[in-house]
Amino acid sequence: MRLYLIGYMGCGKSTVGRKIARFAHLDFVDTDSRIEQREGASVADIITYQGEDYFRAVEHSVLVDTASEDDVVVSTGGGLPMWGDNMAQIKSLGLSVYLRRSPQNIMSRLSPYGRAKRPKFRGLNDEQLLAFMTTHMAEREPVYSQADVVIDCDAMSDDAVIDLILSNIRKLKQPK
């Protein structure tokens, strides 16, 4: 069983993914963390010094590596599904779940550190960030919405989101 969590930056993929992995006794992979371990640098530094194309190639490699892992929850970077055939690969490798949140909801979840560590958010005031996220998320929606399961998370607690995902996992594991 491979579960891939997709969605916009700051939507809770890593937070929710770690809890699902713990409750379901699965391993947890955060693609950004794995990239940072592999490269010995932060995602922001990789993009700044090596370029986005290099980062996306490493990110794709990390996605391909998850094919060899079983019983895992994978939290993807926000842009991972957008590049090349990554979304098709995600769907072929396991269950994909899109954690859909509004820009306003994501802004309310982001700590100052959460904003600062994301290169695309740096230097933006609240109004600029909201405008950027609104446009950027609309561009990504057609790809994200290809996920096997789409969860509108704004009105849900993280615990309710986790319960919903766990129930989907249980349905998949039941004999037909």
Image (cartoon, helix red, strand yellow):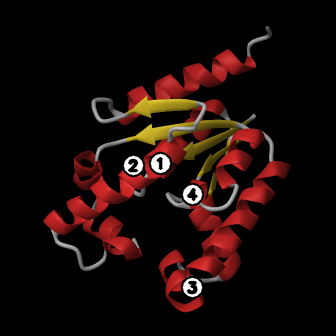
Relative to 141, 167 lies left or right? right
- Viewer-side label of 1, 4: 4
Looking at the image, which residue is at 65% across and 80% down?
54
Mark 3 crowd level (few <14, some 14–19, many ≥20, 10 Å Cα): few
Amino acid identity at mark 4: Met
Disc 1 or 4, which lies upstream in sequence? 1
Between 21 and 121, the residue placed more toward the observer is 121
Q: Nearer the viewer, mark 2 or mark 3?
A: 3
Mark 2: give few (<14), some (14-19) or many (20+) Cα within 10 Å: many
| Sequence-wise first label, 3 or 4 | 3
Q: Are marks 2 and 4 in contact (CB under 8 Å)?
A: no
Q: Is residue 15 visible?
A: no
For image coordinates 53% across by 79% down, the residue present is 42
Task: State the SS at label 3.
Answer: loop
Which residue does the numbered mark 1 point to in the structure image? Answer: 7
Give the residue pinned by disc 2.
Answer: 11
Percent x, y of residue 37: 65, 74
Q: Which mark is residue 82?
A: 4
* Label number found at residue 51: 3
Which of the two discs, 2 and 4, sits closer to the camera?
A: 4
How many numbered badges does the structure rendering display? 4
Circles 2 and 1, Cβ within 8 Å, touching? The answer is yes
Labels 1 and 3: the sequence-earlier one? 1
Which numbered disc, 3 or 4, marks the residue closer to the eye?
4
Quick check: 129 left or right of 96?
left
Horizontal relation, residue 70 to residue 119: left or right:
right
Pick out the residue farthest to the top: 176
Is label 2 in a helix, a strand or a loop?
A: loop
**Most foreground residue, 1 or 151:** 151
